[in-house]
Structure formats: structure tokens, C-alpha cells
Image (cartoon, grey):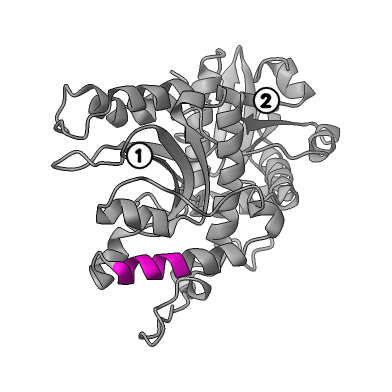
């Protein structure tokens, strides 16, 4: 099932007077959202469908989450396809979580005012080129507190009429662009936009310092030999972001379908190893944040060269090197190729890659 089919089926079958039990077609479909379209969303993002708890909601929706920001729609920022109560339109919107704030402000005008002010402040802090193509308004045609809160909390939005739903590729491209808006919004210090009503109490956020236990074991380490390096690296705890792990978990099944064996267990500190017909590929995954391909490419290049030297120095296997990204890295594709590194990235159409990635059979030819 593609995204367009899913949205059309929800609009066609959803019944807000029905229960949320198993066997109710639209509710079953919403619960199956991760399996149905989980591999179609931008790399590293996660999806879930919501039809209400206890009773059916008037405005069913599909959440798209950056797991580094939140997996819980009760708070923080996420994307959502929210249907109007008449099911004649669905809106892709950048949302603030409303439930936690409701616990503080109840469900009336105070809540909506705070959400509107937060949305306005946050949108004003985003680069104009990022939000210029998006409306800030959403309308869900229901008087319930939650629908009104969703309207108030919208930072950026695009409404689609169900009877004129765009083609699949357009929907995917829109989601890819909105995911960039989410990344930028998530990078804004929350204390600067998550304000309080005039005259209300102030809110402060405490910083977090690394304890001695959290320091990188390689800090201040200058190995005298390969064995020194391996001894420390094997004990090193490498912190991976949730989106980084999701990227790998999405790519693994795809490449397995091409005949490769993806391996993550027992290959620490490597992200992923692929094996096929006696050959081995060393894969380093990187999340491109706010369009900053430079940082992601530098990190991938350094780690691939480092790991291939130290981890394979005594091995009969010489791994082929692959950098895996959440999005295309532009001119860096040829740069990585010049260093013998294939690159792979997610597009709205699916997975794509460099010349050597195609040659290895890791992606299909363009």
C-alpha cells in the first residue's frame, strides 16, 4: 500500500461512531500504519496511526515522528496527517504536543492561546526559505477541545482535499520537505519559543553536563599501536541517536531483499556489516541534519577510514566502504567516490546511490 491509498482508505472507511476494537476496518488500518507505510517515510522517521482510545476520535490522524525529538505525541514536536471531522480533507502539519500542556492549562482558551503564541514564536525563528511554502493554519471542523488544540498548535501546514489528493510522489516529496521543517524547528532551543501566557510564571531549563562516566574513552587517548586502539575501542560505549538506529533498521530489510546479509550484532563499534558471496561491506550511517551534508560526510569518511584500517588490519577480508545517509549529499557523492566510498541515501521514490553502490548491487540503477 502506498501513502495515497492509505489516506484514501482512511477517509473512505473511518467511522467516528464506531468503536476502536479489532475488526473495525479503519481502526485496524490505523493500527497497521507502521507496517503499511513505515518504509515510505523519510529515512529514520517513524509512523503510527491514531483513531482514539476508548472511543473513536472525531479527527483520526497519522503521526510521523523523529525519534530523536519524540515518540510521544503528548509533548514536543512531530508531524501529523490530521483528517477534518467530515473526512473531506487531510492536513500535513507540524504539531506541538498538546496533552502535557493541557494538564497545566486545562482544555479551554488559555491552552489554545498558549499554543498559538508558541507556534507563532517558533515559526518566526525558522529560516524564511524553510517555511515560505507552508501555511501556518489548519482547520479540522470540530468543536472538541483536541481538534481546536491541533488547529492552534500548527506551526506549518498543507491541506489536501481528499477528492483531489495529489499523486503519490508529490505526497512523499511534501513529507520530505516537511521533515526538514521539523528538523529546523527541533534545533531551536525550546526555552526560546515554549513561552508562557503574559503575566504567567517563568520557565527555565537546566543544562546537562557530562559526568566522568559519560566521557568518551578515547578522550586524551593517543594509541601507540593498533592493539592499543583495538583494546580501548572494544570497550568503548558508542552513543547512537534513535533516528540513526531507525535509519539502519529501515535499510537492513531493503538490502536483505537484494540478497545481502545485514549484520548488526557482534560488529561493535561498526554500524552495519553486509555480506554476500564471500565479500564484505562496511557501512557507516549518518543523519543529515538541517541540510548540513558537510558534517555528515566528514563523520562518515573519518569513521570508515578509521574502522577499515584498525578493525581489518589483521583480517584477510578487505571491506568495501559504504556511507549511508538519510538524504542526498549532493557534490559529496563524487567526493566520497574519489576516496573509494560508495554512498546511499533515501529519496521520496526509495533508496538511491552512487555509481559504485549501483555496481555493488546495493541499490537499483536510476
Residue in the foreground of this view, choosing between 115 and 263: 115
Residue in the foreground of this view, choosing between 19 and 2: 19
Is 338 above or below relative to 151? above
Q: What element carries label 2?
A: strand
Residue at 72% over, 18% down? 358
Residue 13's label in the rendered image is none
| Mark 1 touches mark 2? (CB < 8 Å) | no
Residue 61 locus on image (x, y percent)? 35, 39
The residue range painted magenta reads: 109-117
Residue 122 locus on image (x, y percent)? 54, 65
For disc 2, the marked residue is 352
Q: Is residue 309 left or right of residue 40?
A: right
Can residue 268 be seen in the rendering of this structure? Answer: no
User: Quadrant of the image for the C terminus?
Assistant: top right
Is 350 above or below relative to 308? above
Residue at 65% over, 38% down? 327
For disc 1, the marked residue is 61
Q: Main secondary structure of the magenta part?
A: helix
Query: Going from the N terminus, do you reach mark 1 or mark 2 first?
Result: 1
Q: Magenta segment: does it hold 145?
A: no
Mark 1 and mark 2: Cα distance apart in space = 30 Å
User: Quadrant of the image for the N terminus?
Assistant: top left
Is 135 above or below relative to 326? below
Other residues around mark 2 within 10 Å, as few (<14) / some (14–19) / many (≥20): many
Can residue 94 be seen in the rendering of this structure? Answer: yes
Is 181 above or below relative to 29? below
Residue at 81% over, 32% down? 337
Q: Is mark 1 on a helix, strand or loop?
A: strand
Amino acid at each position: 500500500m502506498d501513502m495515497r491509498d492509505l489516506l484514501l482508505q482512511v477517509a473512505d472507511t473511518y467511522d467516528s461512531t464506531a468503536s476502536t476494537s479489532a475488526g473495525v476496518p479503519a481502526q485496524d488500518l490505523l493500527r497497521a500504519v507502521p507496517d503499511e507505510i513505515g518504509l515510505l517515510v523519510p529515512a529514520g522517521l517513524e509512523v503510527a496511526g491514531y483513531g482514539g482510545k476508548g472511543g473513536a476520535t472525531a479527527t483520526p490522524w497519522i503521526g510521523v515522528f523523529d525519534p530523536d525529538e519524540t515518540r510521544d505525541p503528548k509533548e514536543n514536536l512531530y508531524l501529523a496527517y490530521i483528517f477534518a471531522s467530515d473526512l473531506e480533507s487531510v492536513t500535513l502539519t507540524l504539531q506541538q504536543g498538546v496533552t502535557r500542556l493541557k494538564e497545566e492549562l486545562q482544555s479551554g482558551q488559555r491552552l489554545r492561546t498558549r499554543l498559538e503564541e508558541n507556534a507563532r514564536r517558533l515559526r518566526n525563528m525558522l529560516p524564511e526559505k524553510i517555511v515560505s511554502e507552508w501555511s501556518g493554519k489548519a482547520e479540522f471542523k470540530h468543536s472538541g477541545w483536541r481538534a481546536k488544540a491541533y488547529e492552534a498548535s500548527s506551526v506549518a501546514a498543507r491541506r489536501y482535499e481528499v477528492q483531489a489528493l495529489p499523486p503519490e510522489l508529490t505526497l512523499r516529496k511534501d513529507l520530505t520537505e516537511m521533515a526538514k521543517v521539523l528538523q529546523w524547528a527541533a534545533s531551536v532551543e525550546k526555552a526560546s519559543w515554549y513561552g508562557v501566557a503574559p503575566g504567567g510564571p517563568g520557565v527555565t531549563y537546566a543544562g546537562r553536563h557530562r559526568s566522568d562516566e559519560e566521557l568518551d574513552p578515547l578522550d586524551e587517548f593517543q594509541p601507540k599501536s593498533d592493539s592499543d586502539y583495538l583494546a580501548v575501542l572494544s570497550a568503548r560505549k558508542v552513543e547512537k541517536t534513535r533516528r540513526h538506529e531507525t535509519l539502519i533498521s529501515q535499510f537492513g530489510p531493503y538490502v536483505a531483499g537484494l540478497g545481502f546479509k545485514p549484520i548488526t550484532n557482534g560488529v561493535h563499534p561498526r554500524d552495519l556489516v553486509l555480506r554476500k558471496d564471500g565479500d564484505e561491506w562496511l557501512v557507516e550511517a549518518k543523519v543529515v541534519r538541517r541540510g548540513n551534508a558537510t558534517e555528515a560526510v566528514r563523520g562518515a569518511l573519518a569513521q570508515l577510514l578509521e574502522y577499515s584500517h584498525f578493525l581489518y588490519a589483521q583480517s584477510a577480508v578487505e571491506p568495501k566502504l559504504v556511507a549511508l545517509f538519510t538524504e542526498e549529499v549532493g557534490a559529496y557523492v563524487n567526493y566520497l567516490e574519489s576516496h573509494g566510498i560508495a554512498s546511499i541515501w533515501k529519496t521520496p521514490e526509495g533508496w538511491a546511490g552512487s555509481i559504485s553502490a549501483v555496481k555493488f548491487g546495493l541499490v537499483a540503477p536510476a
